[in-house]
Image (cartoon, grey):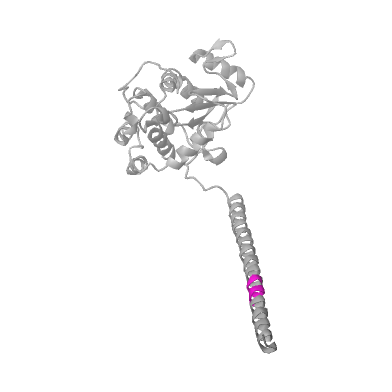
Amino acid sequence: MSEKNRDGKRTARERMQEERAAQEAKARRNKKLIVGGSVLAVIAVAAVVGVMVQNNRSKPETPVAAPAGTIGDKNLVIPVGSANAPSTLTVYEDPRCPACGAFEREFGPTIDQLEDQGKLYVNYHIVSFIDRAVPGKGSRYGANALGCAQDAGHFRDYHDVLYRNQPDETNDAFGNKATLIALAKPIPGLDTPAFQACVNDNEFSGWVSAVQQDFDKSNFKSTPTVLLNGEPVYPKMGTEEITPANLVKWVDAANQGKPLGTPGTNGQSPAPTSTASETNNPSPGSGG
């Protein structure tokens, strides 16, 4: 083989080696770019997620439209009576709860009287969990209607009428908005287009959900739950069973030496007692 041919073959071999080395170097560079790009992409995604999480943490919770005059954290509580009354009764109720209906029919007049006398400030938490276990929407629609009545300044009257006409727990009559609107007709000033629209549009559905979520996070598991100045009084206080007479006795004992409340200081004076007839009065049942 001539020297010229050997040089040519060497040169070709060298070119192949150079090209292979170049290709390997290029492959290594591409691999680095891909890996680097992936890392940057992960970092970028993490940064975006971090910003989103931080934004979610820094943003306040979405406001929920609450009925006028509600109080407490997130305005979840409906107050009745004098805000400066010496004692507070806290009541958790579900519109479909038969035990709540029985409680209200037995104790409602006494509670109304104690409110009117400036002895008692009542805070209502209207929950709606029975719809989860019993088919229907009566708890939620009933709670919304009570919110609508509160918004119109007639909560107490409508609340009393609603429980006096409460259907059986398995009868979803309160899931019919026309029924809820009809119950407002005997109450002066409540049967208005605004109230009807509020009920039909389920205007306070978000508020109803928020009240229930608050109840879910509490230590209370059933309704009615009734507390007098933070102490449970239903079905008994200590060793004494609750009765209308005992409730008056307990409130008077707690109020001893304290000035009575001023009517109307909660922003909603008690509405006149309704004369609506009792169209349904089921026997007391178990709680929700």
Q: Is residue 27 above or below residue 181?
A: below
The quadrant of the rendering that contains the C terminus is top left
Residue depicted at x 32% and y 21%: 280
Q: Residue furthest front?
A: 1
The relative height of residue 30 versus residue 169 in the rendered view (above or below) is below
Q: Quadrant of the N terminus?
A: bottom right
In the displayed structure, 23 sits above or below 263; it is below
Q: Position of residue 139 (x, y in %)?
A: 40, 31
Horizontal and vertical percent for residue 73? Answer: 57, 39
State whether the magenta stretch is mostly helix, strand or loop.
Answer: helix
Q: Out of 215 and 29, give the one closest to the viewer.
A: 29
Q: Is residue 35 visible?
A: yes
Residue range of the region highlighted in magenta in the rendering: 19-24
User: Can I make out residue 184 in this image?
Assistant: no
- Give the camera-side residue of 26 and 138: 26
Task: Give the residue drawn at x 32%, y 43%.
Answer: 193
Query: Is 186 included in the stretch rendered in magenta?
Result: no
Q: Is residue 60 above or below residue 262?
A: below
Q: With 259 as the anchor, is 186 left or right in this view?
A: left
Residues 275 and 122: in front is 122
Rendering coords of residue 267 (x, y %): 50, 38
Report which quarter residue 132 is drawn in: top left
Residue 20 among those drawn in magenta: yes
